Amino acid sequence: MRILTASGERPDYSKEKVAGSLRRSGAKEHVIDDILRTLERELYEGMSTKQIYKLAYKLLKEQDGLTASRYKLKKAIFELGPTGFPFERFIGAVMENSGYKVEVGKVVQGACVPHEIDVIAVRGEKKLFIECKFHGEQGRNCNVKIPLYIHARFEDIKKHTPQKGEINQFFNEGWVVTNTRFTKDAVQYSHCVGLQLLSWDFPKGHGLKDRIDHLGLYPITVSTLLSGREKQFLLSRDVVLCKDLKNNKFLLDQLEISERRKKKILDEMEELCNSRIAYHGK
């Protein structure tokens, strides 16, 4: 049975891949088995991965709302758009919760021109230049042009000679972070010039999903209780993380949410913040 991916490819359906994604979200084995059985009854030639995911999510939500929220993580990050700025703040939060001091959207002078850096992350002697490439839809991967452009900016900043009284902005590493994936050429070029890459599942075992699950640092868009309008309202007020909403409960009053529903939403935020999956990264 061939299915249709977001990039237009037509691989064979793999129940192992579906089971793996459910398992990584923390779903129990008997729940996974139930979902796979239902999926196999519903499958048809050319069914899209988006439709498969949507059905699996619906089935998982009926049995385990918290795990369904984690399973929804990839789609939830797409929902941070369309400007990409909430994604930059989200990456800043991931780095901050990994022990770095963070600045978002700072302008730094290069040898030729000034550059606005999405995220600057500092820990001890390590100072990272991080550029975020946000895509609002699946199937749009980062090709080699992205690291080429970002490496050129990184080199321009490195070549800048500070003027009298100006702070020397020296960076140890340049990073490119995306919510989708990198092409093979992008990975090869970045490895050659020393750029660090972070995407949904790269580096293997230490990708964006692994870091988020380990930190329990979920965006509010994973919520199964908030409506799309409510999520956009909160994002527009710089509430990007579930823990941000815990600290800004008054915004739910501005949305005129009932006390009963507010309690359910805050309980969901609390569960997600305390929900962590083992990971060994740096």
Image (cartoon, rainbow, N blue to C red):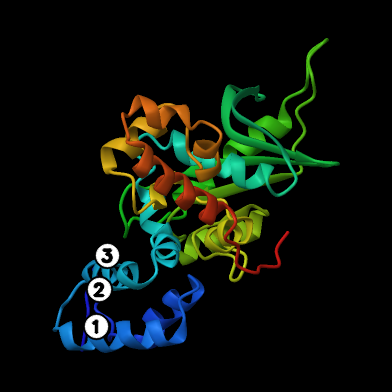
User: Label 1's element?
Assistant: helix
Mark 1 touching mark 2, by CB under 8 A? yes
Q: Is disc 3 placed on a helix, strand or loop? A: loop
Residue at mark 1: 39
Label 3 with label 2: CB-CB less than 8 Å: no
Residue placed under numbered mark 3 in the picture: 6
Quadrant of res 20: bottom left
Q: Quadrant of the C terminus?
A: bottom right
First reached walking from the N terminus: tag 1 or tag 2: 1
Taking the image as shown, residue 100 lies to the left or right of residue 10, namely right
The residue that disc 2 covers is 52
Instruction: Give neighbour class at mark 2: few <14, some 14-19, many 20+ (Cα, 10 Å).
Output: some
Q: Amino acid at mark 3?
A: Ala
Is the C-beta separation of discs 3 and 1 under 8 Å?
A: no
Q: Position of residue 218 (x, y in %)?
A: 51, 51
What residue lies at 72% left-to-right and 31% top-to-bottom? 159
Q: Position of residue 251 (x, y in %)?
A: 42, 28
Q: Earlier in the sequence, mark 3 or mark 2?
A: 3
Q: Is 169 placed above or below 97 here?
A: above
